[in-house]
Image: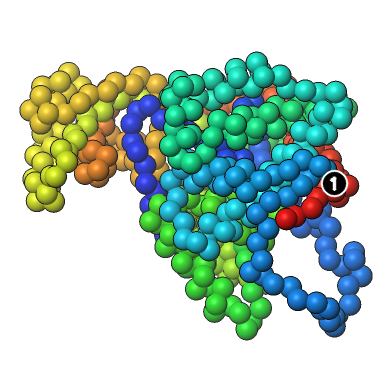
Amino acid sequence: MKGQRFQVQVKMTLKVARFGRLTALIVGIAVSSSLAAQTVSDEAVPSGANLDLPQNLQIFGKADPNVRKPTAIVNGYVITRTDVEQRAALFTALNQLKLNEQEAGQLRLQVLRLLTDETIQIQEAKANQITIGPEQVEQSFARVSARYGRTPDQMRAWLREIGSSERSFKRQIEGELAWQRLIQRKIAPFTNVSDEEVEAIIDRLEKSKGTEEFHLREIYVSATPERSGEVFQAMQQMIQQMQQGRPFEYFARFSEATTAAQGGDLGWVRAAMLPPILAQAAQQMQVGQVAGPIEIPGGFSILYLVDKRQVLMADPRDAVLSLRQLTVKFAPGTTQAQAQAKVAQFATVVKETAGCGAVGKAAEAVGAEVVDNDAVRVRDLPPQLQDIVLGLQIGQATPPFGNPTEGVRALVLCGRDDPKSAGLPSAERIRDGIEEERTNLRANRMLRDLRRDAIIEYR
């Protein structure tokens, strides 16, 4: 089943800022990437069967789904409605979302859960004599501000502008640093990986050389036969909103799979690891596409192909490019007819540009700005541009792309360094990846136990 093209709104400049986990609301302060993400089987999660629930039950009292609890007291610490609103405003601004009232209410409930976890993490760190001082928070605040291309003062002004606050931002920084330090003290030193485990992974990699792997995200929603039509239609609406620019991760929060907390991230998987219908879809998708809704036993899935590769094989999309970018911007009040005429002129000039040395002259002809970058990996470009750029010869340009609001751009290829043959990752890198995976799993278990023991009062 061919996937539908996942159209994302991209502000395309050669200076790209990438965000980390959306569920954390801001870029992680010190989160390192693992060697390979692993899926968690449903069997690893406690199910309702362990509670010995009756088949036919009666609810005593009224469960009103319209009741919303905006505040909470977590082990004596008060989370106010202002805390929730400010963190929700940060999430909304970072992801450029426009939410209706129902969606905003759902987001506030999710933010309240995140703030509850954050509070529990900070409290547990302090119980273990781990305190993050103001100077550490301030240093991290400055680093994160720079990552967003702002000074600390500019970041403070931006936070106020979007309805958030410096205090809320720094509270999250404190929570992340405290939790990381607690993990480093209580879990990481006791996570060991044997030489035999590393050797077994190296052996499996060698045997699977050339096998295609897919980095997938998934949204799964269960459906009874009676509700299948309703669920299918709802998931079609999800895809339509993704095509209009809403992030996949926003909808992944509603997934019923165990990966919902990770934005639906399945990590790198092979076709043989997926149900046959999902494997077929993944093999037919292009990077950046969404496929679905796909009917599988018990419900429907939506897949998003983040990336793909072949085990231990060089990937053309790892090529490092030298690019010159031309940008034409439109003055306020430009009519659609004027914009179309300008884009047509731009397209003609770009097509006739004879190599990178002629870019300056071409830019003068159409009033374009020029930006150079000598270290752009193909896979870091938007999916829509990757195949186009891979087909270019030195000196050739892409067709114009963009929009009248943010400007129309074109890329001229000035150089390309193709990747060398991929080799086996080092034993140390494999060991670090396994240790990180196990550490994260144990940290999740520790947080689950802390939630269970916490005294939480909703108001």
Secondary structure, mark 1, is loop
- Residue located at (75% from left, 55% from top): 458
Where is 413 relative to 267, above or below? above
Q: Nearer the viewer, residue 342 or 279?
A: 342
The residue furthest right is 52
Where is 103 relative to 441, above or below? below
Q: State the quadrant of the C terminus.
A: bottom right
Pinpoint residue 370: horizontal percent, then vertical percent: 22, 24
- Residue located at (66% from left, 46% from top): 80
Which colour assignment does the render follow? Answer: rainbow
In the visual, does 181 lie left or right of 339? right
Pinpoint residue 369: horizontal percent, then vertical percent: 20, 26
Q: How many marks?
A: 1
Residue annotated with mark 1:
454
Q: In terms of image quadrants, where is residue 191? A: top right
- Residue located at (59% from left, 68% from top): 300
- Residue located at (7% from left, 28% from top): 365
> Dot 1, crowdedness within 10 Å: few (<14), some or many (≥20)?
few
In the visual, does 331 lie left or right of 311? left
Where is 255 relative to 206, above or below? below
Amino acid beneath label 1: Ala
The answer to whether residue 52 is seen in the rendering is yes
Pinpoint residue 171: horizontal percent, then vertical percent: 65, 32
Pinpoint residue 147: horizontal percent, then vertical percent: 49, 25
In the visual, does 382 lie left or right of 404? right
The answer to whether residue 262 is seen in the rendering is no
Q: In terms of image quadrants, where is residue 213? A: top right
